[in-house]
Amino acid sequence: MISQQNDVVIVGAGPTGLLLAGDLAAAGVRTTVLERRLEESNLTRAFAVHARTLEQLDARGLADELISTGAQVPSLRLFGGVRVDLSSLPSRHPFVLITPQYQVERLLQRRAVAAGANLVRGAEVTGLRQDADGVDVDVTTQDGPVTVRTSYVVGADGLRSRVRAALGLPFPGKAVVTSLMLADVRLAEPPRDVLMVNAVGDAFAFVAPFGDGWYRVFAWNRRNQQPDGVPVDLTELREVTREALGTDFGMHDPRWMSRFHSDERQAPQYRVGRVFLAGDAAHVHSPAGGQGMNTGLQDAANLGWKLAAAVQGRAADALLDTYHAERHPVGRMVLRGSGAIIRLALIRSRPAQAARTMILRTALRLGPARRRMAGMISGVGIRYAAPRGAHPQVGTRAEDLPLAGDQAGGRLAEALRGGMFVLVAPSGADAAAARAWGDRVRVVTPTAATPLTLVRPDGYIAWVSEESEPGRRDEQLRVALGEWCGAPVVSQESDAVRSGTGQK
C-alpha cells in the first residue's frame, strides 16, 4: 500500500533507488519506493562492482557479504590484450568484483526495507506536479489510480524515465552501439578468466559468470546490424564469440536471448525544484568499463545525506544544488570515457587496431597514466570541485584510516556506518567545539598523524585544517561545521560548550 505520509518518493527499485532508500530510511526520513515491476528479476546487464562502490557499500556494512557472492578480478581487460591494473589502487578493495546486478539489488533491498522504507511494486508513475511546498505524484496501481503527496521526488527509473518526461527535460544524445546481442547460456568449457572480453575485426564479445553455472554473453557483429526486436540466433552468437575470443566455450541451452542498443545520453539538469534525477534516468552510456550501475550508486550516495538534511531542516536549499554541481560533471566524464573505450574497441581496420593497442600499452607503462586510468575506472580517483583556497584534499575521497580505540570501529568506513559526518581529530587536538553538533558529527582519533579533517557522510572530505593555533583552529572548525552540518544544537552540559557553539 502506498503511504500518504512521505518525505521522499523514489521512483524505481533498481540499485540506485534502493541504496538511496536505505540511506534515507536509516536517517529517519519517511521514504516510499515505487516500482512498476511486480516481481524481482534476475535479468541483468551490470556485472562489475568497482572499488569506490565497494567502499560505499563497506560504509553501509554490506561490502563483505557482496564480495562473497562474486569473483575478485585484479585487472580490467579492455581489448587486444590491454589490461588496466587495479591491484595497486589505494583502497581496501583493489579489484573489480564480478557479480550480477541482482545480488547488489538483493542486499540493498533488504537493507532499505529493514530500515523502514516502503517498497511498493506494481506502481507506475504517470505524472507529477510540484509547488513551493511539495510534489503530487500520480500513480497507477493494481487497485487503481492514486495521487501521492511528498516533499521531494527522485527519479531513478532508468533510460525511459517517466519522472524525467514529466519534468519536460530533454535527454540529448545518440546510440553509440546498435544490435548488441545478449544471452544467458550454459558453457561446456568454462573460460580461463573470470571475465572474458575482446574485440577483433567486426566482432566483439564479453562473457561473465552468474556464479550458478549460467553465463551472460554480450556479442556484437558489425556485419549483421538488426533492430532491437529481431530475435537473436544462437548460431550467430557462437560465431561472433569465436571470432572475438577464439572459442565459443561450447555454449548451449540458452534460457534467454535478446537484442538491444546502447545510448550515450545525459540530462542537462539533475535537479528541477523538488525533483531529482539519478542513475540511468540522468545519464546512460556504453557498457565499456562497467560504469553504469556504479555511477548510479555514487549518485545515490551523494544525494541521500543531502536530502535527509533538507527534510530534517538542517540544510539550506543551496546544499541540494550541490548534487547537480558535483554529479553532473562526473556523469559527463564517465560518458566520454566509456564512449572512448567502446569506439577504440570497435576500430575496424587491423593496422588501426594494432596502432591503438601499441599506444595504449605504452601509455599504461607510465605510472601517472596508469594510476589515472585505474582511478577513473574504479571511481577512486574521482573528486569534486573545491572552493578557491581550500585545502588540496577537500573534495577528494577520504582514505579508510585506521582509528584508535574501539568506540567507532577500527576503520573510518566503519565510523561512517552511522550515516553521520565524521571529524577526524588527531591525538591532542581539542575537538570540543564539535559537541554542539553531536547529533550529526562523530569524532574519531586516527592512529597516524593526520590533519583535523571533516568527512562527509558519503566519504568525501568537506574541510581540512592544518592551523596550529588552537583559537583560530576552533573558530575555523565551528564555521565549517555550521556550513556543512547546519545550526548546532546548544548543549546543556556546560557554559564552556555553549559559548563555543558558534550559533548564528
Image (cartoon, rainbow, N blue to C red):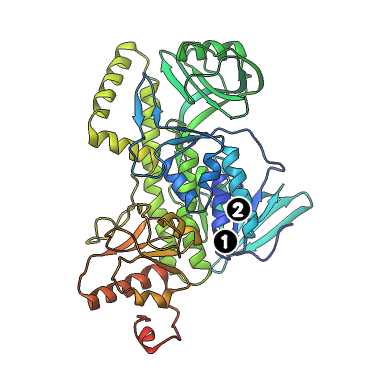
For the C terminus, which image quadrant?
A: bottom left
**At numbered mark 2, what does the secondary structure look like: helix, strand or loop?**
helix
Residue underneath mark 1: 26
Q: Is residue 331 above or below residue 322?
A: above
- What crowding class fits label 1: few (fewer than 14 Cα within 10 Å), some (14-19), or many (20 or more)? many
Picture coordinates of residue 212 (x, y %)? 62, 28
Which residue sits at x=42%, y=74%? 437
Query: Residue 232: image x %, image y %?
Result: 61, 18
Q: Identify residue for label 2.
A: 111
Name which of mark 1 and mark 2 comes first in the sequence: 1
Residue in front for this viewpoint, 173 or 3: 3
Q: Which mark is residue 310?
A: none
- Where 101 falls versus 320 (above or below)? above
Give the camera-side residue of 227 and 251: 251
The residue that appears at 79% across and 52% down in the rendered structure is 143
Q: Which quadrant of the view contains residue 181?
A: top right
Q: Looking at the picture, which amino acid does disc 1 mark?
A: Ala
Q: Is residue 272 visible?
A: no
Please tell me whether mark 1 sits on a helix, a strand or a loop: helix
Looking at the image, can residue 439 be seen?
yes
Displayed quadrant of residue 473: bottom left
Q: Is residue 349 left or right of residue 416?
A: left
Residue 414 in percent (x, y) is at 46, 56
Q: Give the amino acid at mark 2.
A: Arg
Q: Is residue 286 above or below residue 327?
A: above
Task: State yes or no: discs 1 and 2 in contact (Cβ < 8 Å).
Answer: yes
